[in-house]
């Protein structure tokens, strides 16, 4: 193991395990320890306690707007190739702050506390090596993390062109279950959606709820989910023409013996209002948490300007159009195991 990785890892003895040895319990203890020993993290969480939020109903869905000044780092991140080449990777172990510590998972990923939290318990989980942000070969690890952290947390993935502020370094994020509004809405949405495949191994549903269009996979079989994602990537590439990874965000959690995976295909990284000038500009760079119903803006002036109409505009731009989504749905259905 590289010395830079070994340096940041906390032993079980150092984190004084209390309340269980599962990964979720250990991560929870890690967060408490880091708040006490890492000033940047304690400052970030002190700021989170003062974050302003408001809730609105948009077409029957709960949307929570969060004014979170600390998220300016992520919302305004330059993710073009030249900017990435010119900066050090902030997820590589050698470049982490001296006070930051983590927990090794499966020998390949490190659970780290996120110093700029959105969730009230927020973790970033990068790969131990500097490798591109791609879900295809790493989806199994995401499922394993969701299973290992099921006691407290859910997992998120932001594609390299869909909200990831480090598209050059593979990573996931985790936050406490019950935080995102869509978790409470998903049962209704699935019941109203179109079943594309329903077998003993897995159920796949397409949800076109107007505000958001996405796919829901539910299964207790890891390999079935991995295979379904592979088919979905192919289906999306077929209708969008993407030669690289199709744009997407993913939410995943494990509950009562099954994984629940929400996959949000995207058509755009940032809405046009992000690039507008003057009063038309709103600094918002949607990622997985925004797909889940928590829209975060780092600027106070934008907090009150995110109206229901603007939320519809944002989602209308970043998600697939009705026509493209229906084409992807048909492509996916034809390649999945039939009912």
Image: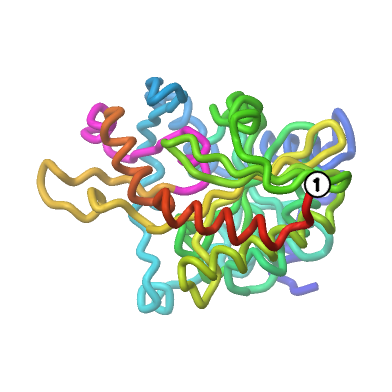
Question: Going 88% across and 33% down the picture, which residue do you hit?
Answer: 20
Residue, disc 1: 202
Extreme residue toward the left, this view: 278
Using the image, determine if residue 210 lies above or below residue 167: above
Q: Is residue 157 visible?
A: yes
Q: Quadrant of residue 57?
A: top left
**Which residue is drawn at the image coordinates 70% and 46% (left, top)?**
204
Question: Is 249 displayed left or right of 202 in the figure?
Answer: left
Which of the two residues, 47 or 239, is positioned nearer the viewer here?
239
Judging depth in this view, the residue of 331 and 300 nearest the camera is: 331
Q: Left or right of 135: which side holds 313?
A: left
Position above or below: 100 against 290: below
Residue 247 position, x and y percent, is 49, 61
Which region shows up in magenta?
Answer: 287-306
Whether residue 299 is in magenta: the answer is yes
Question: Who's the residue at 14% across and 44% down the image?
Answer: 280
Tell me the element at label 1.
strand
Q: Quadrant of the N terminus?
A: bottom right
Q: Quadrant of residue 189?
A: top right
**How far from the left and from the top, in percent, is residue 330?**
58, 56
């Amino acid at each position: 193991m590289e010395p830079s990785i070994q340096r940041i890892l906390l032993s079980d003895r150092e984190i004084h395990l209390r309340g269980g040895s599962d990964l979720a319990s250990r991560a929870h203890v890690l967060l408490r320890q880091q708040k006490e020993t890492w000033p940047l993290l304690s400052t970030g969480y002190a700021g989170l306690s003062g974050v302003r939020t408001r809730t609105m109903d948009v077409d029957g869905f709960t949307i929570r707007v969060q004014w979170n000044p600390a998220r300016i780092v992520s919302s305004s991140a330059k993710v073009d190739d030249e900017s990435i080449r010119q900066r050090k990777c902030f997820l590589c172990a050698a470049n982490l702050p001296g006070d930051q510590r983590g927990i090794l998972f499966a020998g390949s990923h490190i659970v780290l506390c996120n110093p700029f939290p959105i969730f009230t318990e927020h973790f970033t989980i990068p790969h131990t090596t500097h490798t591109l942000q791609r879900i295809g070969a790493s989806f199994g690890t995401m499922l394993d993390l969701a299973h290992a952290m099921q006691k407290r947390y859910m997992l998120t993935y932001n594609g390299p062109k869909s909200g990831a502020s480090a598209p050059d370094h593979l990573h996931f994020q985790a936050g406490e279950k019950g935080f995102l509004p869509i978790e409470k809405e998903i049962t209704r949405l699935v019941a109203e959606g179109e079943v594309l495949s329903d077998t003993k191994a897995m159920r796949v549903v397409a949800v076109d709820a107007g505000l958001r269009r996405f796919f829901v996979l539910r299964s207790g079989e890891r390999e079935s989910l991995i295979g379904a994602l592979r088919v979905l990537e192919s289906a999306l590439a077929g209708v969008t023409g993407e030669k690289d990874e199709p744009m997407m965000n993913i939410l995943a959690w494990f509950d009562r013996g099954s994984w629940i995976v929400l996959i949000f295909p995207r058509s755009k990284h940032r809405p046009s209002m992000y690039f507008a000038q003057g009063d038309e500009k709103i600094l918002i760079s949607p990622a997985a948490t925004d797909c889940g119903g928590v829209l975060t803006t780092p600027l106070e002036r934008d907090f009150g300007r995110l109206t229901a109409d603007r939320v519809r505009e944002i989602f209308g731009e970043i998600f697939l159009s009705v026509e493209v989504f229906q084409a992807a749905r048909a492509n996916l259905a034809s390649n999945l195991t039939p009912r």
